[in-house]
Each structure stands twice: as structure tokens, then as C-alpha cells.
Amino acid sequence: MDILYSIIYPTFRKDPKLKWFVDSLLNDIDPDDLAMTQLVLVDRWAGPKPRKTWLAKQGKLAAFAEVTHTPVKPNVWCGEHRLPKADYFAAANYRNTGLLHAKGEHVVFADDLSVVMPGWWHYVAESRRLQEIYLGTYSKELAMRVVKGKLVDYKHHPTGQDTRFQPHMADPFYCTGSWMYGASLAGPIEAFLQVNGFDEDCDSMGSEDYVCGIMIEKLGWKFKFCPRMKTTESEELHGSKGVEISRIIKPMGATDASHVILNMAKAGRNTGAFYSNKQMTLREARQSVLAGDPMPECSIPQHDWRDSQPLSEM
């Protein structure tokens, strides 16, 4: 049976609580959809050999039509090809790696350390039927206890709530692409390919999700915010010991780099940076990877666009 959905699950953690996600999803997804769903696990620790022992403990992965376990694609910010002294936050590269391996016409993104709440998949399927981008909500809570994919107990964390969400919101409702957060969303893969994926100039600082959303919206794609398309994720596990990753938002003139790239997107930037040694778009790279070729090599850029600092000095 053909792959219809590709769920992209990026993580740089050794223990991302993948079983939480898998068990909760299997509780929620339509069985017919599951038979057409690929799980793309983009894992910092995949290495040249899969973590087979770890994977075997992550729930019923065999229930998916296909599971793709891959390291993040070669890039200059993190992983074995990095230029800085330590790994930097490179969410755009992780998300684009998922898009390279996605076989489905509809892609779904979910953050690690998260549990799918009941009804989540309903909105994923609806977004495919309507060919619109659906934006789920999230909350970050403490002391989460998950049993067979169900969140049975937690301690409420007031500062871990989705600032987009307000009580008594309609469900769902149209919104702008700037509302796109990477924690929970679904949409046609074509929308992401048209803007070259998530802008890799956002790596080391973030902002790649809503910048991508702004560019997609300019092409005419419709967005809906779905207050009941929810995931709940662990707050304290974000700071797990043994995982070192740097994140920096550099000053630029009277503002900072995150505002600079946001203003670029608002002012007309309509395609994200996708870096490889061979000049190619994300669409071209995906066609190559799905044809069986290795992920594209990348040793550029060697200087930070924000201040021309050599990455090897960071």
C-alpha cells in the first residue's frame, strides 16, 4: 500500500520518550490511516548503525507502514560534520532531513518528549482532506506520568502553556502563517517544498517554524489553528543531563537576528536557505534521497551570515 502520511519526529536527545508518542498515537490514529503512515525518526544519535536495542523498546513501531530512522543530514551546525566546537540548535536541518525522507503527500511534525492527546489525529486527517495546514497546540507540564500512551498524571506548569491559545476559541479557525509552531502541525508536503523547506539561516537560533509559515502563506496556502489538536510534553526533561546543545540569538544593529530574519520574511523573502555543497533545492535533494542516493554533503557556510564570524570559532 502506498504511503499517504509521513510523521516527522526530530530529536537530539538520547531518550526522547518516543514510546510516549508511539503509544499515544496508536491509541488515536485511524487503523486504515496507520497502514499508510511512515514514521521518520530524525535522531542525533542514530549514527552509522541504528540504535536497535533502544528502538526495540519504543512501542509497536512495526504497526507503521514504514519506519525510517536517520541521523540529521550533513550540516555545519551539528552532528559529525559540524564546524563549531559543540552542537548548536539546528531545528531547520532536522526538519528538512525529515522532509528529504518523507514519502507521503502529507507531512506531520511532532516534537519529542510529547504525548498525543485524544482527537489529535482527527485534525491531521482533516488537514489532508482539505489540503490546508493545520496548527496544533501544546502544553509543557511537569512530573508527567504516561501509561500505555495515556497521560494519567502531571503537575501543571503555568509558564509552559501555548501563548496562542485562549479559552473558548473556535475550533478550528483560520489564522496567519506566522502562527506556525513546529511542536504540532500537519500539511501537504508540496507547501513545504515550494518554499525550500525550513530556512537553514535560522539554525543556531530558532524561528524557523513561523518564518517558514509566513513564506508558505504568501503562496496562497491556508492555515488553521486547532486548539483541540493538542500534544502535551515534558518541561523538565528538556534539560536532560548529558545533552549539550548551544543556542544563541545574536544582536544585529538596534535589534537581533531573529527579528531581522522575521522582517526579511515579511518583506518578501519567499524561499528558505537549503545548504549543500552541490547547488540543489530541497525538492531536488528529496528526489535524489528517495531514489536511493545518500543525503547531500555539506560543508557550507563556513561563516555566520549574521556577523561573518567563522563557525569554527563559535
Image (cartoon, rainbow, N blue to C red):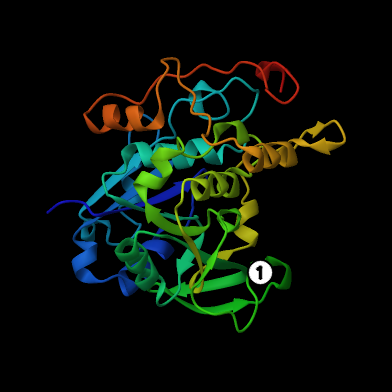
Asked whether, in this view, residue 65 is left or right of residue 277, the answer is left
What kind of residue is marked 1?
A: Gln
Q: Quick check: 75 above or below 34?
A: above
Asked whether, in this view, residue 248 is left or right of residue 279, the answer is right
- Residues 145 and 98: in front is 98
- Residues 81 and 17: in front is 81
Q: Quick check: 248 above or below 32?
A: above
Most distant residue in the right direction: 254
Task: Give the percent coordinates (x, y) of residue 115.
Answer: 47, 67
Q: Is residue 245 visible?
A: no
- Identity of the residue drawn at 69% across and 72% down: 157
Residue with the mark numbered 1: 161
- Identity of the residue drawn at 40% across and 22% down: 280
- Which corner quadrant of the image does residue 121 belong to? bottom left
Asked whether, in this view, residue 91 is left or right of residue 50, the answer is right
Quadrant into which the N terminus falls: bottom left
Task: Give the percent coordinates (x, y) of residue 14.
Answer: 49, 46
Q: Is residue 188 visible?
A: yes
Task: Give the percent coordinates (x, y) of residue 203.
Answer: 60, 34
Element carrying mark 1: loop
- Identity of the residue drawn at 30% across and 70% down: 29
Task: Give the percent coordinates (x, y) of residue 296.
Answer: 38, 22
- Identity of the residue drawn at 40% across and 60% down: 132
Quadrant into which the C terminus falls: top right
Asked whether, in this view, residue 162 is left or right of residue 223, the answer is right
- Which corner quadrant of the image does residue 144 belong to? bottom right
- Which corner quadrant of the image does residue 91 belong to? top right
